[in-house]
Image (cartoon, rainbow, N blue to C red):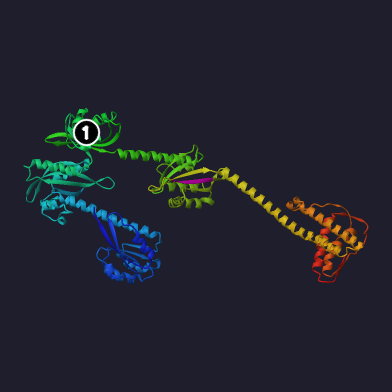
Amino acid sequence: MYHCHLRFYLMGRDRGLLDAVRGAPPLERFTHAFTESEHPDAALCAGADVILLDLRGLDGPAALDALLPAGKQGAEVLAVASRDQLSGLAPYLPRLRDLWIDPAPEEIPFRFLRWQEGRKQAADLWEREHFLDATINGVPSLIWFKTKDGVHERVNDSFCRTVKKTREQVQGQRHAYIWDVEQDDPACIQSEREVMKKRKTCVSEETIQTGEGQRTLTTYKSPLYDIDGSVMGTVGVGIDVTREREYQGALIRKTEMLESLFTTMDCGVLTHSLDGKRILNVNRAALNILGFASREELLAGGFDLIASTVEEADKPRLRDCIRSLKEEGDSVGIAYRVRHDDGRLLYIMGNVKLVRQNGALVCRRFLLDCTAQKEQERRDQLEQERRQMELIQALSMDFRLVYFLDLDTGSGYPLQMAEGVEEPLRGFRWGRSFQKSMDEYIQEVVFPGDREALRKACTLKALGERLARDKTFYLNYRAMSRKGAAYYQLKAVRAGAWNGRRGIVLGVRNVDDATRVELEQKTLLREALSQANRANEAKSAFLSNMSHDIRTPMNAIIGFTVLLAKDAENPDKVREYTRKITASSHHLLSLINDVLDMSKIESGKTSLNVAPFSLPELMEELYTILLPQTRAKEQSFEFQVKGRPAEQLLGDKLHVSQILINLLSNAIKYTPNGGASR
């Protein structure tokens, strides 16, 4: 109903912050207007309801000294500052509504929204207090609130006018001082004790002795309850009927109006005789709830203490409750069901009370339709059961323990526990703190090297932060057993949408066999990779060596081919060059065959082909192959074989020639001029 127009003064250089505040939509019943400046402006500040100051990059104390005195009474001051400014702002903190330290850009809308919500809560509270005060002070009846010791905590204007004292004089005082008598009224004290003891409203007519004589009040006293449900005092409503006894009809109407003040307007009201044969009055809400169009239709339907549309299973219980009331003021509450002609089933919360009307005791009944609430509770329960079953199935049946945890309260309970589960896991039971159970489990079972990691991961804060990012996470650890260390896995699954209650489901299972198989497979893969690397290195070394061996005979072939082309008309030269080309080609072919034997490369080994060969022939072939290199460098080159040159040697001719070619090629390569002999 209220409307609040807020004038904002924004001071600062950060356009992102100012734009975020200006762009934030006002909450319901609020409108905003903005003025702003980069530097302190006392004139703009003076007309603002809300002052938002970005002190970053400014002299914070100086800006506050300039603006705070200029602000009007009741204006709220919000400040944004850097962390290094905090110490200098300490004297001004009592004047600030809030202080934002180095907020991130995405944090500004959140903080401003929180401030808006706080402002709206204060406005809503003001509205409720205003409505309550207007209601209490607007009625002509006396209204008071007392502690259990009889001290008046709060009274309305009518009460003050009646006792001819101000509210300050009355509140905090007892009966005797207020009514100007020597002692508290024993009857008043006794009635309030009965109200607190029986915990029900007491209606009575009391005669009060005052300094000006007696007054007669019709009082309605009800218990006041504390937050924990205990009785902390009484609330009373009194109608001064001292001079209005002759106006009995008006008094009845005021009484009914006062009683209606404490009932819900959309609540069904039905009044009938004690025997249930006559319906004295019934409102439209009650007829709609019971499924009838009029009082006549309700009677014609067979009304007999209860309506015919009440469920057959609930009729005996409802009838017994009504008949159990014996004296005026007795009341009972009961829940039952009503089924309409169209088959619709309604859940009713009822209250029956014996009251006196026109001098006779009657039953006044209140009916409240709770069908929507009941169906919602049923849907919530089914949804909760469905989620729990899905979570249990998601965790699978091989988990030793499945446990539900409420992160907001730190309490939980087991959803599933395998037969023969280890004793430490039995600590996760109903009514026991999750953190205590987890600490004991870690200390008694978990391998010492894994305790700290598991302890850090399983705090309520850590679980909440991790599952806020990921709906599921796993943690492997080792647990001690009779056979030694065994591998276990903890799985955490977020329960529900986390838009209210934050619940998770934890599962613990043994993964020792699977983990060990995985480790063995990793070992095999590492060994295979090592072998492949060694084979690759052998290939590289082999091919590097072979490239040198192949180039030497190839150069000889090319050189003699060029000479052959030059001396093509000389038959002796042609035969000599052809023979040398043939020798070099055979040597090259042997090398190529060795290269193509890939099994030698991959294994890193070379097999020997042992056979008889002639050393002079071998040296002649080498001479032929290396001759082009020596001529190119203008070097002299000759072989001298001493000893028994005609004898056949036993060995691998190809590898011997490879060794000699490598040695001689290096000698030729690193000899600038001159000659070499062997």
Nearest the camera: 350 or 291? 291
Residue 574 counted in the magenta span: no
Q: Residue 669: image x %, image y %?
A: 80, 67
Left or right of residue 607: residue 453: left
Secondary structure beneath label 1 = loop
Left or right of residue 639: residue 154: left
Which residue is tagged 1? Answer: 293
Q: Is residue 465 above or below residue 16?
A: above
Left or right of residue 445: residue 597: right
Residue 490 counted in the magenta span: yes
Q: Quadrant of residue 627?
A: bottom right
Residue 646 in view in this figure:
yes
Nearest the camera: 44 or 253? 44
Q: Residue 188: image x %, image y %?
A: 14, 45
| Main SS class of the magenta portion in the image | strand
Task: State the quadrant of the C terminus.
Answer: bottom right
- Mark 1 is surrounded, within 10 Å at the Cα level, by few (under 14), some (14 to 19) or many (20 or more) other residues, namely few
In the image, farthest residue toward the front: 569
Q: Residue 602: image x %, image y %?
A: 73, 52
> How many numbered badges does the structure rendering display?
1
Q: Is residue 566 above or below residue 537?
A: below
Residue drawn where x is 12% and y is 55% of the image: 165
Magenta residues, start to end: 488-494
Q: Is residue 609 above or below residue 562?
A: above
Q: Is residue 411 above or below residue 312?
A: below
Q: Amino acid at mark 1?
A: Ala
Q: Residue 519: image x %, image y %?
A: 60, 47
